Image (cartoon, rainbow, N blue to C red):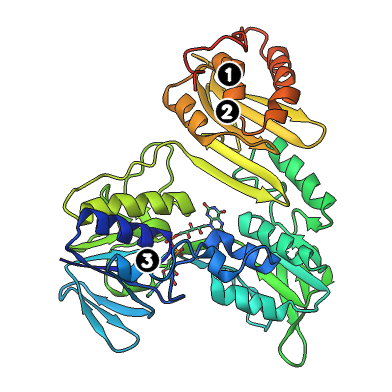
Amino acid sequence: MHLVIIGNGITGVTAAITARRLSPEARITLLGAESAHHYSRPALMYLYLGHLRYPDVKPYEDWFWPENRLELVHAEATSVDTAARSVQLATGQLLAYDCLLLATGSVVRTAGWPGQQLHGVQGFYGLPDLESMSRATHGIRHAVVVGGGLIGVELAEMLHSRGIRVTWLVREQRYWQSVLPPEESALLAAHILRNGIDFRLATELSEVLGDAQGRVRAVVTSTGQELPAEWVGLAIGVQPNLALARAAGLETDRGILVNEVLATSAPGVYAAGDCAQHRQPAPGEAAVEQLWYTGRMQGETVAHTLCGQPTPYRRGHWFNSAKFFQLEYQTYGRVPAQPEADIASFCWQHPSGKLLRINFRQSDNVVTGMNVLGLRQRQDTWERWLREKAPVGTVLAQLAAANFDAEFSRQHEPAIRREFSRQFPAIILASPRRKGLFGAQ
Ligand SMILES: Cc1cc2nc3c(=O)[nH]c(=O)nc-3n(C[C@H](O)[C@H](O)[C@H](O)COP(=O)(O)OP(=O)(O)OC[C@H]3O[C@@H](n4cnc5c(N)ncnc54)[C@H](O)[C@@H]3O)c2cc1C
């Protein structure tokens, strides 16, 4: 069996390593256009910040690949012939496959702004983007970031770390309003402003202005203001990279359409990670998942199917984490931006800028999700509470079991419980000392 994997991101690499474990005899080829070896994409910002060097963001030593008989090819796949089962490479080489996995990731989205092609205007997705950003921002004084998601905040922090004055334009009325409830948005907006960013909500980019050399010199906002900018970072999101799949005639929508075992519309061809779109996502789950850990899970799942053990993809409870200028954010389960029917939302805030939110069903008090800002919680404990449908009273009584930070439990847990009793006086909390059904570690 020759398994060819296009894309050496977390999805492709996890699939390759899992397939090697499951099929010691299989020939496995891993193609990557961007870099010879796999690196951690979420760690890119730390290279710019100077906290890490390139070898530090490669999770595997270079000897790992030949040692495990994983054939790496640093080249772009330019087309796929699904009838002949072959992949054409830019180098001229033609690779025959028995099974093919498309793990081609995402590409940066743009909005067709006038001037977006000027030198010094770019998105931020991979190593080439990091290199051009490092060159173009050397010694500059003003930069503009456009778009309010997680890559936007990374760009703002990266630029700010080099003493560059950053103006950050966000179209929405409040920060990350499609994802966060209002209290979290407000806390983060205040935190970003406190960190010295000229943060402008309800403001869009209208146009990028250039100088005589074709370099960006300013932007014009939707409020008609002209702002100086020697560099502009476009961070309005990413979209699945469909180029190869479309050209090969695979069924696509927003992503490459896959069934529950991540098979595409062509026999022997699978897709996973950022580029895939589930035809029938489970209720409440996203059809396109563009996250590191879901890429890893999809890569592991699809490898089982590729190795003759058909396995449906089940993500389990939602989890995500991020950092906003040192302020940690974690979310587990379902915490939508707007309240849902039958869901109560308890929110505790500390004046120092910490927040804990717990959502639970009003009908039976079962916890359905939580957000924290400025506090660190244990993923395994929250997974278990969500899986075992723990009641909110038990979770609050056992909150210490979930925290990473002893200081947090000492200082804040009694206050959190007091605040809960104030907001929900009808719900009786179990004693914090007694080990409850869900509390034992
Ligand atoms: C700056 C940044 C920070 C992020 N931070 C986080 C985070 O903190 N937490 C989180 O959960 N997620 C984060 N993400 C998202 C996360 O990195 C992605 O969800 C994840 O990398 C997707 O993995 P993937 O393997 O599916 O795709 P990718 O990582 O995009 O890998 C796909 C690879 O396929 C290659 N490829 C594409 N087409 C071809 C071709 N034709 N031939 C050969 N090779 C090809 C590409 O060059 C690319 O290297 C971040 C993303 C970015 C850009």
Residue visible at 70% across and 65% down in the picture: 49
Going by the numbered disc 2, the residue's amino acid type is: Ala
> Residue 245, can we see it?
no
Residue found farthest to the bottom: 212
Instruction: Locate residue 411: give its quadrant.
Output: top right
| Distance of label 1 from label 3 (alpha carbons) | 43 Å
Residue position marked by numbered label 3 in the rendering: 64
Q: Horizontal and vertical percent for residue 354?
A: 74, 35
Q: In this rendering, would 259 be left or right of 276?
A: left
Going by the numbered disc 3, the residue's amino acid type is: Phe
The correct choice, above or below, for 184 with respect to 41 in the image is above
| For the residues bearing labels 2 and 1, Cβ distance under 8 angstroms | yes
Residue position marked by numbered label 1 in the rendering: 398
Going by the numbered disc 1, the residue's amino acid type is: Gln
Q: In the structure shown, which secondary structural element does the residue marked by tag 2 occupy?
A: helix
| For the residues bearing labels 1 and 3, Cβ distance under 8 angstroms | no
Q: Split into 4 quadrants, where in the image is the N terminus?
A: bottom left
How many numbered discs, if any? 3
The mark nearer the N terminus, 3 or 2, is 3
The numbered dot on residue 402 is: 2
Q: Cβ(mark 3) to ligand 1 < 8 Å?
A: no
| Distance of label 3 from label 2 (alpha carbons) | 36 Å
* Crowding at mark 1 (Cα within 10 Å: few <14, some 14-19, many 20+): many
Residue visible at 66% across and 33% down in the picture: 405
Point out the frontmost of discs 3 and 2: 3
Instruction: Locate residue 72: give its quadrant.
Output: bottom left
